[in-house]
């Protein structure tokens, strides 16, 4: 994985010093909250319902064991012994004191980590495919391109006061595991006539106006990648709406201009920028690539897995994914125990995952946008030992991509924007399906819950989505069907009137039952919905 | 005409030449008249309209009515990219925490609504030992140093 050189280290160290100074000026009363807010936000510090929340960047979700240990130590030292992994492959701490925030950043800097641009109206942490470098179907590892863009976007002088936040995802396979087309910019590394290049999808997003990004350029040569991104951003910075924060994302600009006009403006800007020396030399990309070479996979590693323990066999079937190296898999550690809080991990669990990553996965683990952790490179021969250790720590839930593997935002339990709680709904749904035994039968069923219209829980992209709203002071939950964040991307549609907290759990089960009744061979929930449409579900829910 | 700069104790310049001695006009009036050599660019103005006339401009003020409106950073940078060599002054809600980025975008003068303390300014401008990008200033990006 990428390691800092002295330059990268100087930059994070300078950031710690800057933030320490800013926090001190705030605490001394020299900065008003209004003046301090954008500064703390660019360091990932939010003021939530009960305390400050700190969001730490995990570039493209990749961590080594030392970093995961540091995250555990921070949870113990400055928080309440746990952290929350997010849909942007980051981690959040929910109980932070302003007085200690700079110390946390200093602790992070010691392990080549930071909270730079994890919030605010700037280019956020770059996300990527959580199976990068391991997936059987990828063209190349997408992370070097994500790292190149991370450096370009860090402390970008022109794009730090954008109309709104800006999220970029980079993938390099036709299978989309990063919700690429639901980002402000989605980049897919592609091959054309033997050359690598980048396809740019611009103007996707969730929030209150979900949109799927159109492809504005099917091939940008790799030695123009940064320049093209710069052109995309400049057009947005100049013309993106600033009159209404709900219309300020780039998706609205692309929609209102039309993607052809937007592309034309970008191409004109790009042409002017070509001689400006914006692009790092190709040698820099090559330097970054050397950090992402394959680990030393054991040649001839055994393909055998002893499946005599049925619980283990179930976990292998559900939670491991094909790997490009023979005898290896990627193993997903579910942070979705039945009745648990999606994405939460205790410091002890983090330490265990760190140690297992070191022991079994070349010292590397990844945060998935589905709020789980993956050990990317595990020998099949080691799976039983790995599972035994995980299972003993409450980390062995065999439920990847099932109805129990719920994405949920923090909701009204923590978030000052939320209208409704998300976590208790997720807990009740996973408990319901664990109790009725339908989880296995339902197979792949992606369920995503947001506690408000800002859609941090990706409800638009759920096979089943749930949106919490406030209805005359009472929490109410709308049900949505038919979304997908993957390569078959689609936006979910609302079924009809909402439900109360107990009612939404029943409604999810009702929708699941319609699928079980109507499905044809091999269909997932999403496939059946797409074939039969909304009507049978509505009849079952409201008829 | 009065020398505005001599009465203006909030103005900070990183230039050797004398400040322009008359007030800036709006982009529209600048484009309509030939005599002005100072213009003020508002966030909604298209700074590119000035490019055919850069030769006769000595001062471009870029107004930041609110510091969170970052359009002025692009206005500044594209003028520098187009070869503008005159004074580029950030005016309005310009805070010490933004000046380092503004310098990188080509601003070489600041006239903030609220005065900036010299020591705060010094700290802010010397904060970053390195930069990751090439921009409108002369700083060498990290990637260039790595492959020097």
Image (cartoon, coloured by chain):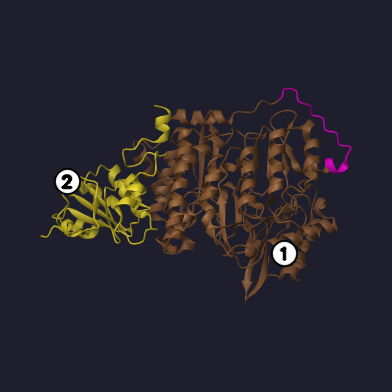
Chain colours: A brown, B yellow
**Camera sees residue A476:** yes
Q: Residue at x 57, y 46 (%)?
A: A180
Q: Is residue A304 magenta?
A: yes
- As rendered, which of A175 and A276 lies closer to the eye? A276
Q: Position of residue A136 (x, y in %)?
A: 67, 33
**Camera sees residue A167:** no
- As rendered, which of B95 and B32 lies closer to the eye? B95
Residue A180, placed above or below residue A251:
above
User: Looking at the rendering, in which quadrant would you find the N terminus of chain A?
Assistant: top right
Main SS of the magenta segment? Answer: loop
Q: Which mark is residue A310?
A: none
Q: Position of residue A282 (x, y in %)?
A: 45, 29
Q: Secondary structure at mark 2?
A: loop
Q: Residue at x 65, y 55 (%)?
A: A80
Q: Residue A406 lies in what quarter of the image?
A: bottom right
Left or right: A109, with B42 as reference point: right
- As rendered, which of A127 and B116 lies closer to the eye? B116
Q: Secondary structure at mark 1?
A: helix
- As rendered, which of A439 and A536 lies closer to the eye? A439
In the rendered image, which residue does mark 1 sit on? A535
Q: Residues within 10 Å of mark 2 (few under 14, many from 20)?
A: few
Left or right: A213, with B87 as reference point: right
- Residues indicated by labels 1 and 2 sit on the same polypeptide chain: no
Left or right: A166, with B63 as reference point: right
Q: Residue furthest bottom?
A: A472
Chain to which mark 1 belongs: A
Residue interval drawn in magenta = A298-313
Residue A10, placed above or below residue A512:
above
Q: Position of residue A56 (x, y in %)?
A: 56, 49
Q: Position of residue A327 (x, y in %)?
A: 75, 29
In the rendered image, which residue does mark 2 sit on? B17
């Amino acid at each position: 994985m990428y390691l800092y050189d002295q330059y990268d280290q100087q930059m994070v160290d300078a950031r710690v010093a800057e933030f320490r100074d800013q926090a001190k000026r705030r605490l001394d009363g020299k900065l008003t909250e209004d003046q301090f807010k954008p500064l703390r936000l660019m360091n990932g510090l939010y003021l939530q319902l009960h305390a400050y929340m700190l969001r730490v960047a995990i570039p493209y979700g990749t961590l080594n064991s030392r970093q995961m240990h540091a995250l555990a130590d921070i949870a113990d030292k400055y928080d309440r012994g746990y952290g929350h992994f997010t849909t942007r492959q980051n981690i959040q701490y929910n109980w932070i004191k302003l007085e200690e925030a700079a110390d946390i950043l200093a602790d992070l800097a010691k392990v080549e980590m930071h909270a730079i641009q994890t919030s605010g109206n700037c280019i956020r942490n770059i996300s990527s495919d959580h199976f990068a470098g391991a997936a059987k179907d990828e063209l190349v590892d997408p992370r070097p391109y994500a790292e190149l863009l991370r450096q370009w976007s860090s402390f970008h002088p022109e794009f730090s006061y954008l109309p709104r936040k800006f999220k970029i995802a980079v993938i390099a396979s036709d299978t989309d595991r990063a919700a690429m087309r639901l980002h402000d910019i989605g980049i897919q590394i592609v091959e054309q006539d033997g050359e690598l290049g980048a396809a740019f999808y611009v103007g996707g997003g969730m929030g209150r106006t979900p949109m799927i990004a159109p492809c504005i350029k099917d091939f940008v040569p790799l030695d123009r990648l940064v320049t093209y991104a710069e052109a995309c951003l400049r057009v947005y910075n100049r013309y993106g709406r600033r009159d209404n924060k709900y219309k300020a994302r780039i998706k609205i600009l692309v929609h209102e201009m039309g993607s052809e006009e937007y592309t034309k403006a970008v191409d004109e800007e790009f042409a002017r920028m070509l001689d400006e020396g914006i692009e790092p030399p190709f040698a820099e990309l090559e330097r970054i690539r050397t950090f992402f070479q394959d680990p030393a996979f054991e040649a001839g590693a055994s393909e055998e897995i002893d499946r005599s323990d049925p619980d283990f066999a179930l976990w292998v079937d559900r939670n491991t994914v094909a790997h490009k190296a023979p005898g290896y898999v990627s193993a997903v550690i579910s942070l979705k125990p039945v009745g648990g809080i999606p994405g939460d991990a205790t410091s002890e669990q983090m330490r265990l995952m760190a140690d297992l990553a070191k022991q079994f996965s070349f010292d590397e683990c990844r945060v998935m946008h589905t709020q789980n952790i993956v050990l990317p490179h595990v020998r099949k021969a080691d799976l039983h030992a790995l599972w035994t250790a995980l299972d003993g720590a409450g980390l062995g839930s065999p439920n990847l991509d099932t109805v129990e593997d719920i994405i949920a935002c923090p909701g009204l339990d923590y978030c000052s924007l939320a209208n409704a709680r998300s976590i208790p709904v997720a807990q009740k749904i996973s408990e319901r399906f664990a109790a009725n035994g339908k989880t296995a039968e339902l197979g792949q069923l992606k369920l995503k819950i947001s506690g408000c219209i800002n859609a941090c829980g990706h409800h638009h992209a759920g096979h089943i989505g749930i949106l919490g709203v406030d209805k005359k002071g009472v929490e109410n939950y709308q049900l949505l069907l038919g979304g997908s964040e993957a390569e078959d991307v689609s936006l979910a549609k609302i079924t009809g009137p909402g439900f109360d907290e107990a009612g939404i759990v029943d409604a999810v089960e009702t929708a699941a039952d319609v699928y079980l009744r109507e499905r044809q061979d091999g269909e997932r929930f999403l496939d059946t919905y797409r074939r039969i449409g909304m009507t049978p579900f509505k009849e079952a829910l409201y008829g | 005409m009065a020398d505005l700069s001599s009465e203006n104790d909030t103005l900070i310049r990183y230039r050797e030449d004398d400040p322009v001695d008359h007030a800036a006009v709006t982009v529209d009036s600048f484009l309509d008249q030939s005599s002005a050599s100072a213009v003020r660019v508002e966030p909604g103005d298209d700074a590119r309209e000035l490019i055919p006339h850069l030769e006769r401009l000595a001062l471009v003020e870029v107004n930041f009515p609110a510091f969170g409106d970052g359009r002025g950073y692009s206005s500044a940078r594209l003028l520098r990219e187009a070869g503008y060599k005159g004074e580029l002054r950030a005016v309005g809600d310009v805070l010490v925490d933004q000046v380092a980025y503004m310098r990188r975008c080509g601003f070489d003068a600041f006239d903030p609504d609220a005065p900036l303390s010299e020591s705060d300014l010094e700290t802010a401008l010397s904060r970053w030992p390195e930069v990751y990008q090439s921009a409108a200033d002369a700083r060498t990006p990290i990637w260039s140093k790595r492959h020097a």
